[in-house]
Amino acid sequence: MPAIEKEIQDLEGYVLPHEGGKHLATIVLLPFRKDTWREEARPALSCFEKVIDAIRPFERVLLVIHPSFPVSLVTRFQKENVTILRLPYDDSWARDNTPIFLRKEEKLVGVDFGFNSWGGDYDGLYPDYQDDNLLGRRILLELRIPRHPRKDFILEGGNILSDGEGTILTSGECQLSKGRNPSLSQEEIENVLKKELNAKKVLFLPYGIFEDETDGHVDNIASFLDPGVVALATTEDKDDPQYERSREDLLYLQKETDALGRPLWIVSLPLPKPQYLTKEESLGLEKNQGVVERAEGRRLAASYCNFYQGKDFLLLPQFGVEEDKIAKQILEDYYQGRKKIIPIESREILLGGGNIHCITKEIPFSPLYPIEPEETK
Amino acid sequence: MPAIEKEIQDLEGYVLPHEGGKHLATIVLLPFRKDTWREEARPALSCFEKVIDAIRPFERVLLVIHPSFPVSLVTRFQKENVTILRLPYDDSWARDNTPIFLRKEEKLVGVDFGFNSWGGDYDGLYPDYQDDNLLGRRILLELRIPRHPRKDFILEGGNILSDGEGTILTSGECQLSKGRNPSLSQEEIENVLKKELNAKKVLFLPYGIFEDETDGHVDNIASFLDPGVVALATTEDKDDPQYERSREDLLYLQKETDALGRPLWIVSLPLPKPQYLTKEESLGLEKNQGVVERAEGRRLAASYCNFYQGKDFLLLPQFGVEEDKIAKQILEDYYQGRKKIIPIESREILLGGGNIHCITKEIPFSPLYPIEPEETK
């Protein structure tokens, strides 16, 4: 009795909602790669668990657990408001290797782009990514949500921000790089994004965060706090290579307008002081052929913009530095109690190359695709 | 990172424990076949849930959910003391299509026999049973329990009862039938059972229950209450075709001894009054090519011996007849408070062709193969 797979070609009327609305659930994939996550992923696993436990009071977590995990691990994560799926994947960046969900009234569709491990043969991070590339389809099948396939176009969810009102913000540094869709011009890429995300305007931010392994995903340097309001990661340290990058981005955003013709209100979020990989952290990683090496002293792409938000909450990365509190204060001042700002120590996720936004993916709310328990008869 | 599959050939020292000892968990598979379970398996599902909920206070349930179930169903069954695996199977008779677990001190092994849907081309109940046949291997891989393969020999767990002290009780009517291992003599079959279950003595009960679709599994007509003590389903109605069958079995058991040379103490469990499939029940079933048809008026193989027990509990089938209480009283008198006797209305399982014992499979306790949650670090 196999489930039936549905496809939708025509995206007329569908919208990529702003992340800060009501969700059906948040997708999270548990970490296991020993060459991404030090000490056999044990510290990362605890950090992911903190993220899951922070989301559970607000909305359901759709937790994907790799078949290689022992069954006792499945038991550990069978918690209230967690629904577990057991599917294969190569690494646990749900933002990037799960579908991008659009909504049209109550209907959902999962746009399923190609995934090549952040650059494929050109500068990808690991050589085997076929389970990642198939994950979107597998998840949609489980959820009975129709699929809109566009596997020939390489795009990670982490390089897309949407205001839910027709504007897509992406990083040109990443999306125009040779490791993505090198045969397409910027205009052609812009047209694909407009068509497949049903957007009216695409903004190409010049730069991401310095040394970001993703080639500079937009979600590590910016975020829509609301439609019309963009948080941008900045630094006042002119000696930091990030200084000029953030300044260029700021100048770009200041002169742009969104799909509705509004100028953008920019909220500056200071970066934490530079973070580096320690010797101990580097030694805890398995070294594998063809997988990016993470050596002692490497600059980590730490940024507060890599937060994750739902309707009533915002999970904010913390690095154990004094800027932590400043970032929290800025967001609290902005949201004025509309969302609970929840700080989470997330260096263990940062060591793997991302942060809280990178390991989460929202599914916009719809009553048509139930994940909550059916009523018992 | 695939899990590593281990095989064990030599069963020296391994024992098939008596069901009434401590378990690691009970395996249950949720029902879904519309041609086995009426009304798209909804009533059966609720009955399975009652069984699961009755086991949970005593031990963990390892619940296998077919990939075709919607994810909201997974959520519904994420309960305390339930660990969910999502694996394919053809029908939900865990007794028959999951491994038979032997134990040697703390080590476990799963003996993985061939499964042919209770008779294959000769008189099997459904034509496609490859997922059933592969289920044992898949479960062992999940649990990291080594496998002892013997796929060339057809045996269902429901045709095996063990006293845990070297005695195996099987039904000759079933095990010697043409739908199992027709090229082997009784002596050869006896030798396979001795070798693959590491048993010292095999008793072949002449008959199972009249009209039992399994060709008369032993677990529907008998059960070891303890080593040396056999419950046997009997009737005093000489007009019932079951009368002579049970009488032959009783005479056989009275003259036999077990592996330790003990004569067997027989506890007679009266059968419920004959039960028949109603028109409404029959009409609720989907009719499919090659699948056994269940017509109105068919005699159902109802028996109290199809109970399931653990160390501290015993789940007893109930049919809404006055014999229900008698069976309960007999077991309470026998166990004298050692086990809680829990009556469960189970006609919906009976309609599918079995009862509580048929939908459960115990894994003997061992600390080496954890299913309980790992400690959070």
Image (cartoon, coloured by chain):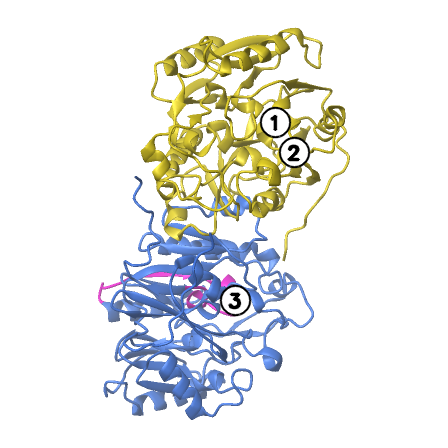
Chain colours: A yellow, B blue
Report the side of B249 relative to B288 (left or right): left
Q: For the residue carrying disc 1, how many other residues have a C-alpha within 10 Å: few (<14), some (14-19), or many (20+)?
A: many
Name above or below for residue B219 compared with residue A56: below
Whether callout 3 and callout 2 share a subunit is answered: no
**Cα separation between marks 1 and 3:** 45 Å
Residue carrying label 3: B134
Amino acid type at circle 3 is Leu
The residue drawn where x is 36% and y is 90% is: B252
Q: For the residue carrying disc 2, how many other residues have a C-alpha within 10 Å: few (<14), some (14-19), or many (20+)?
A: many
**Subunit of label 3:** B
Of callouts 2 and 1, which one flags the residue occurring earlier in the amino acid sequence?
Answer: 1
Tell me where residue B240 appears, x and y as whole percent: 48, 83
Q: For the residue carrying disc 3, how many other residues have a C-alpha within 10 Å: few (<14), some (14-19), or many (20+)?
A: some
Q: Is residue B66 magenta?
A: no
Report the side of B236 relative to A368 (left or right): left
Q: Nearer the viewer, mark 3 or mark 2?
A: 2
Tell me where residue B74 appears, x and y as whole percent: 50, 47
Name above or below for residue B50 compared with residue A355: below
**Subunit of label 1:** A
Residue carrying label 1: A174
The residue drawn where x is 58% and y is 68% is: B130
Quadrant (top left/top right/bottom left/bottom right) for the N terminus of chain A = bottom right
Residue carrying label 2: A180
Report the side of B11 relative to A252 (left or right): left
**Mark 2 near mark 1, Cβ–Cβ under 8 Å?**
yes
Amino acid type at circle 1 is Cys
Give the magenta-colored segment's residue range. B336-360
Amino acid type at circle 2 is Arg
**Cα separation between marks 3 and 2:** 40 Å
Query: Which element type, helix, strand or loop, lies under badge 2?
Result: loop
